[in-house]
Amino acid sequence: MKQFTLKINRIFKVGMTAFMLFWGLVLFKIEAQTVTINSGWQFILGEKASTDWETVNIPHTWNKDDAFDDVKGYHRGVGWYRKQVFFSKKTEDLIHYLHFKGVNQETDVYVNGNHVGNHKGGYTAFNFNISKWIKYDTYNLIEVKVDNSHNPNVPPLDADFTFYGGIYRDVQLISKPQQHISLSDHASDGFYVDYYHVSEEKAGVSVKVLIDNLGSINTSNIIKVSLSDANNDALFSKRIKLNLSAGVSEAINIKLSEIYNPKLWSPESPYLYKLQLQLIDDSENILDERKQNIAFRWVHVDADKGFFLNGKSLKLIGVNRHQDYQGYGNAVPLELQKKDIQLIKEMGANVLRNAHYPQSRELYDMCDKLGILIWTEIPIVNKVTDTKAFFDVCINMQKEHIKQYYNHPSVVMFGYMNEIYLRLAFDNKSIEIEKENQKKAAFALAKQLEQLTRELAPNHITVMAGHLNELYNETGIADLPMLFGWNLYFGWYDKDISDLGIFLDEQHKRYPNRSLLLSEYGPGADVRIFTKTPKKFDFSIEYQSKLHQSYYEQITQRSYMSGMTAWNFADFGSEFRGDAIPHVNQKGLVRYNREPKDIYFWYKSVLNKQEPFIHIAANYLKGLVLFNDDTYPVQVYSNQNNGDILLNGQKLQNVRFKNGVATIDMPFKNGINTIKVISETISEEKTIQVSKMGAVNFETYALLGINLGSHFYFIDKEHQTTFIPDRSYEKGTFGYVNGNIFNVSSDKHQGMPYSIKNTHLEPLFQTMLEGCTEYKLDIPNGMYKVILFFVEPKIKPTENIYNLNANEESIGVKKEQRIFDIYLNDTCIESQFNMAEKYPEKYGIEKSAKTKIKNNEGLTISLKPIQGKPVISGVLIEKL
Ligand code: GCB
């Protein structure tokens, strides 16, 4: 009996296995599957070779380091990737696609040595059907040649961000049955969702689905469309019978019935419905399917009243975003990128401009869910090439862009150009006729792209951004899109902060039918720099606060302005820049590593009303030194009305938060100070170490650093100290006896806005005193180590059109010989110091010496000129 049972069991098991294998095979044969193939690629920089391949994972870029080093330029050329992929014979009847989500910027793909396709453009996805080159039951060699060289026929030609090369978004192998929802329409999902009659009372959905039959026989299939609500409760479903001829692609339009009282989508209530598409064969097997979150919402702009969502006025306030991240270049793990969107939402932003290119679709999914409206654009920046090849690439790129991002409810604005006349505006070489041609070419391309965008995305708002220049008005290009964005940097590159409103009012008056948005604004800010007296171009965190707060007031007061998007959410890589951190554009509300700057919290206090919130903007006030009775202004941000301010346990005052901010002059004491802010149910506390200075002494600190020729503090992690602002000499303290603050041009730039080699202390070196022959420090008797900091400022600048007022004339284009002797009191520590002669350009030089101070004589640093005017950037004194 036992034997018999065993036998039966065995027969049953064998039978089951055979049954499962059979069905497994059948199911597998028809099952669509997508595999991400990011791991274990072989990579070589430059042309293919037999050795020197390294193993890398995707996301990958070859510019993560060289775009930030001291050497000018980064590798812009070819890189090769290769990988062996096994294809089982069981998948022989499937159609296999390689799907690339983002490769910068030109790609050629080979399978087993056969060229399967080329793609131009670094920010949109693309697919290749590789089926006919595959060998089964063996490994297949996939090779990808990537090239990020400058190509005059591929945008962006030129822009203020780094064009990191590499396969920096996922690669997928997508295997589909021969009948499937198309993957061949510009790498879209193969369907497009539209809406009809959307209102508060009712709303309808229609879908256009593209189906490919890549098999050799005619088939009869069913396409099923289902709509459910956010809880997965089914609302409607529709089945349509299709007869698909062999080798043919079909477009099917399906209209679903209307829903009554739909839940509308908005930033406060981002309600999503769920759409499902299934392609089914005549045995009811599911061949392919797609899922998409959709939402009911409608938008329009009005030149007088601004932006409207679902018929209600909505001031758009948010940020621009670049996709790179400190230490990763553009090859950023998706989970890190998603945190950005979370931070943007927490800040209270209702709009995001993905500038200047389409970003990962997963982030758009998040915006769908979180209720963030998106302006998305392709990277045609600064100039165009007047060739058919360039125009064709641009048109194709915009098609990919719209088709791939079309179904996201968050996408309400499609753009295609940024500051297209920037190069032209700074071009003083070309002759008039060439300039005219440039104007016309950009206009002609804009016209084509505008028309295309309106055709492909009829329910969206078309957009474009321009810089401060009449060319956009003169050519009429600003009137092509439905909404024109001005990128305005009053108080940074141009005039003053208060000129913003004056300019906008004048534009609105001249062009009353044009809808406007402030698409970029903001100053650079470095959390190592703080000051009581913020000034244009000093990179201080206080100047950043001042500018953003004023811009917010100016825009919210103007109802015709659709909104504002700050430049930028985060600091980002721009290889040619020489800001306070070289190669980084520091206009972020958060740092390159996403640590929020104070201004991020200010935005949160005015935009996010969800929970009571207080922030004391003193995170970065490290090493504050105050003289005698000096106070220091500290800002407190809150979304509450009022708050009590306490310093060291004593109530100073009750403040009213206007536009989310109150500024309090803090009478700090020497030592540790505690600021406390209490507002109804919440409170916030912060401690600050302050050194009160009467005479110069070394009791509270061992190091005294002074940022010569500068009004700001600079926190220096290398020397573990904060360099304090400079002052003119007064007995008992320190300061310059003579000399001037060195400025590139009188009222705009601080010091020398260029990257300095051999150092990370740019803010110390970039600002300096010129013509100072005597600098006095009344330090007590004793032994000291003195370090002096120098750089030759008259160097040939790197061309940087974004530092618009760094004019070459005033910097001088050749090295200047300045020769001087350096003395510490009576001792000469360097004679005939000649930087232009002895050091490479833009080189940070430190001179260190020990000195004994006696007889209460203090320290005098003398720079005795032999030729030209001496310069000096900083001094650091250590008591030994
Ligand atoms: C702009 C550009 C942007 C730059 C920004 C800046 O107007 O559109 O790409 O990064 O200015 O920081 O100068």
Image (cartoon, rainbow, N blue to C red):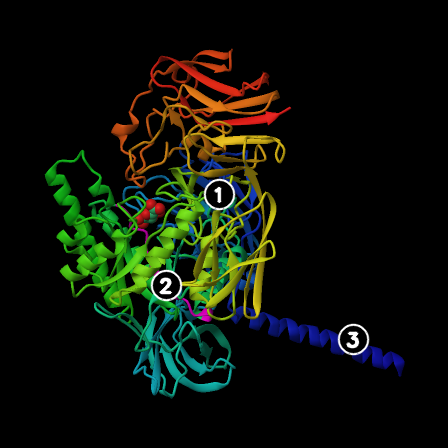
CB atoms of marks 2 and 1 within 8 Å = no
Q: In terms of depth relative to the viewer, which is nearer, 297 or 274?
A: 297
Q: Position of residue 237 (x, y in %)?
A: 43, 85
Checking the image for residue 345, the label placed there is none
Disc 2 versus disc 1: nearer the observer: 1
* 113 up-or-down from 845: above or below: below
| Membership of 380 in magenta stretch | yes
Question: Which residue is denoted by mark 1 in the rendering?
Answer: 630
Q: In the image, what residue occupies the spot 36% across and 87% down?
A: 257
Secondary structure at badge 1 equals loop
Q: Amino acid at mark 2?
A: Ile
| Marks 2 and 3, the one that precedes in the sequence | 3
Q: In terms of depth relative to the viewer, which is nearer, 871 or 857?
A: 857
Disc 3 versus disc 1: nearer the observer: 1
In the image, which residues are magenta? 369-382
* 404 up-or-down from 675: above or below: below
Q: Amino acid at mark 3?
A: Arg
Question: Which residue is denoted by mark 2 in the rendering?
Answer: 317
Number of other residues with Cα within 10 Å of mark 3, as a class: few under 14, some 14 to 19, many 20 or more: few
Q: In terms of depth relative to the viewer, which is nearer, 201 or 2?
A: 201
Checking the image for residue 10, the label placed there is 3
* 5 up-or-down from 562: above or below: below
Secondary structure at badge 3 equals helix
Residue 678, picture quadrant: bottom right
| CA distance for labels 3 and 1 | 92 Å
CB atoms of marks 3 and 1 within 8 Å = no
Residue 744, picture quadrant: top left
Q: Position of residue 162 (x, y in %)?
A: 40, 43
| Membership of 475 in magenta stretch | no
Q: In the image, what residue occupies the spot 30% across and 35% down?
A: 806
